[in-house]
Amino acid sequence: MAIRKRNTYLCLVVLVGGLSLVFLFLETRQLSLDKNTGSTEFRRQGSRHSLETSEESEPENYLGAIQGSRRHGQRQACSSLGFYDDAIYGDGEVLSRSYLRNMHLSLKHQTMICLIPKVGSSNWMGTLLILEGILNSTEGMGTQAINKLGKKHIKSLSSFSRQERQAILKNFTTVLFVRNPFTRLLSAFRDRLETYPNRNIFHRKRHNKKIFLQFGNHPAEEIPDESVKSEKYNVTFREFVDYYLNGTTDVHWREQYKVCPPCIDYDYLGNIETFENDYNQILSMIGADENVPRVRTSHTTHSSADKILRQYYGTLSSEQMRKLTDILGVDMKLFQYDVPEILRRGER
């Protein structure tokens, strides 16, 4: 009788062990393509929230604590602002196309990253091209060339059906990068509209003449002839801020929460201010080859530097700063930013 009980026990152990192995195999299946039907099935490798906080690893513990703090702040803000909606992951459709087209994918690494202009977006597009095997390096490439190639080869969430989008959001590693709204706004102005050698004629053609004439308050003798092209008009940051406060919606300076959905339960919330650490941590999370080169685009406005911030924001009135703080307040609350210390009225 004792032998029979022992044999029964051993059989149960073997059975449970076998079922555990089958379960682990199913959990770790990668993206599979059903070639017969053409359908796509998305499955995540490993845990969705894979940042570890073990006591044995101080760097992981440190980064895990930062992510915990960022995600907690995001959830608190989403709740207080009334933004969070479970339907993102259910049968409903709450993501507008203006969001979907900014949410880019690495299918090989089952990763979705929402790209916001002036928040390292060109760096990340270059990285996606490398991760997908389109490029080995972006060395010597400008941002325009990188983004043009990205539009051709990197899929956005808008390319998929509703059902596939829901599966991707549930199963892919999801990433969002954000930036202090004040430094991003200045970077957009300097990069797109200012005169210092400016490579973005498109935005000057589209905006500068209108800004100059509507918000410049220039005497008649300073107004160019009507035949002068828009890109020849130079506008100041003060004029641009009035234009922005009037409701312009260009994606390069549109509020970040209007460019990417702010309340998805992202696996990683990155900040441009800690770009290098966050970038490396994300590559590690998604299992990217350790030899993936760090992408560095060739153009920067240094708009986070105290000297530059004070130089431009120092031209604004108290009323302009008050209105800016109100408009940018949603981004600041969602992503735990403050008005840069150098811009607080006591510092100026």
Image (tube, rainbow, N blue to C red):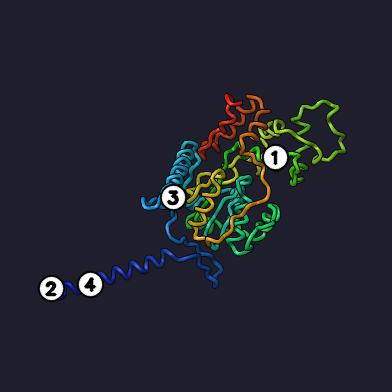
Locate residue 305, reporting x and y percent.
62, 37
Q: Which disc, if any, is residue 10? A: 4
Closer to the chain start, of discs 4 and 1, is 4
Real-space CA distance between mark 4 and mark 1, rounded to the nearest whole angstrom: 72 Å
Q: Which disc, if any, is residue 59? A: 3
Locate residue 263, reporting x and y percent.
50, 44
Closer to the chain start, of discs 1 and 2, is 2
Mark 4: amino acid: Leu
Q: Residue at x 79, y 27 (%)?
A: 218
Quarter of the figure with the C terminus: top right
Please state which of residues 195 and 83 is positioned toward the viewer in this rendering: 195
Q: Which residue is mark 1?
A: 190
Mark 3: amino acid: Pro
Locate residue 73, reporting x and y percent.
46, 40
**Local crowd size for mark 1, using a 10 Å CA cut-off: few (<14), some (14–19), many (≥20):** many
Please state which of residues 47 and 249 is positioned toward the viewer in this rendering: 47
Real-space CA distance between mark 1 and mark 3, rounded to the nearest whole angstrom: 36 Å
